[in-house]
Image (tube, grey):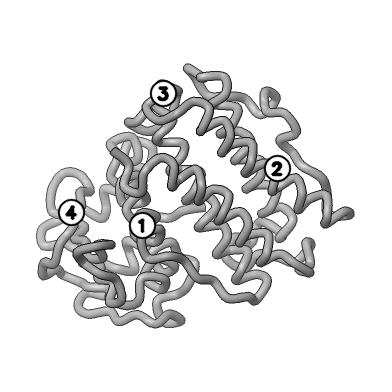
Amino acid sequence: MTRLGYERYCEEILVQTGLFREALRGADLKATVPTCPDWTIGELTRHVGGALRWMGTTVRTRAKEPVSEEQVPDGAGPGDGDPAALDSWLAESAALVAAELRAAGPGTAVWSWADEPSTDFWARRAVHEIVVHRADAALAAGVPYELAPEVAVDTLEEWLEIGSLPQTMERRPELARLLGPGRTIHLHATDTDPDKDGGEWLIDLTGEAITWRRGHEKAAVALRGPMRDLLLVFYRRLPVDGADVTVIGDRGLLDEWLELVSFG
């Protein structure tokens, strides 16, 4: 069972895309995105819209293997010369994937690169793809970035789940450097309702694999702060020293984690 619920994810795809579009109003599409320096704002926008259309095609075709870019209708999107067309294309991209997910319904079998080959995975993944890259857009455009606590919590937990998948370690064997005796990281959101939204996690690196669990436990290092800042630091969208967070304990372990466990 997904944490926010299938229909909530479908709705959030539209909500988060709308907020993404608002962040880009009047922005210079050729400006570099500081948190994704290989991209301009226009390229970031096309990445998000293209990813949504790719997910929509994956769901629509009930794919049993990865879909190629050539199979995605209008996946490239318009160029920077017509900002209105790019904006409309992004809105349509979100509408398309939300419609495909709703038409398929929860629990429908479809290929995914994770352990959950179903529409539930793609509904959740689409939301958090937008959530994180909306932060990139907001930071690049110099506009505020806010996020509902329950969405922020789920975004962070999805990344913990991805980071602890066996195939993640297989694909990135350098993550094994994080493992060792006494190596634990505690994350603590100071402005969430623990009973309603959650907000405390322990990342356990003491075994043979990365694991995590919810709850309040002592750790080698703790990162505390508002949920928004905690999320942006965790996704390396804000530096630790540039966010409203406090580090208690082994800062070196936290820095090592943030360096190795990254989200593009």
Q: Secondary structure at mark 2?
A: helix
Depth check, mark 3 against mark 1: the one in front is 3
Q: Amino acid at mark 4?
A: Arg
Q: Secondary structure at mark 1?
A: helix
Name the quarter where the N terminus is drawn.
top left
Q: Which residue is mark 2?
A: 92
Quote the CA–CA distance across marks 3 and 1: 25 Å
The nearer-to-camera label among 3 and 4 is 3
Chain-order first, disc 3 or disc 4: 3
Quick check: 191 left or right of 217?
right
Farthest top residue? Answer: 64
At label 1, the amino acid type is: Leu
Q: Secondary structure at mark 3?
A: loop
Mark 1 and mark 4 lie on one chain; the one further toward the N terminus is 1
Three-letter amino acid code at disc 3? Answer: Thr
Residue 110 in the image: x percent, y percent?
45, 23
Disc 2 marks which amino acid? Glu
Residue 112 placement (x, y as % from top left): 43, 29
Residue plotted at (79% across, 62% down) = 30
Graded by Cα atoms within 10 Å as few (under 14), some (14 to 19) or many (20 or more), the crowding at tag 2 reads: some
Crowd rating for badge 3 (residues with CA inside 10 Å; few <14, some 14–19, many 20+) = some
Which of the labelled discs sits on residue 35, or is there none? none
Residue name at image x 13 percent, y 54 percent: 206
Residue closest to the eye, 8 or 55: 8
Of callouts 3 and 1, the N-terminal one? 3
Marks 1 and 4, how far apart in space?
12 Å
Image: 256 above or below 17: below
Left or right: residue 114 versus residue 89 is: left
Q: Which residue is mark 1?
A: 156
Q: Secondary structure at mark 4?
A: strand
| Residue position marked by numbered label 3 in the rendering | 108
Q: For the point 36% across and 70% down, which residue is it?
A: 227
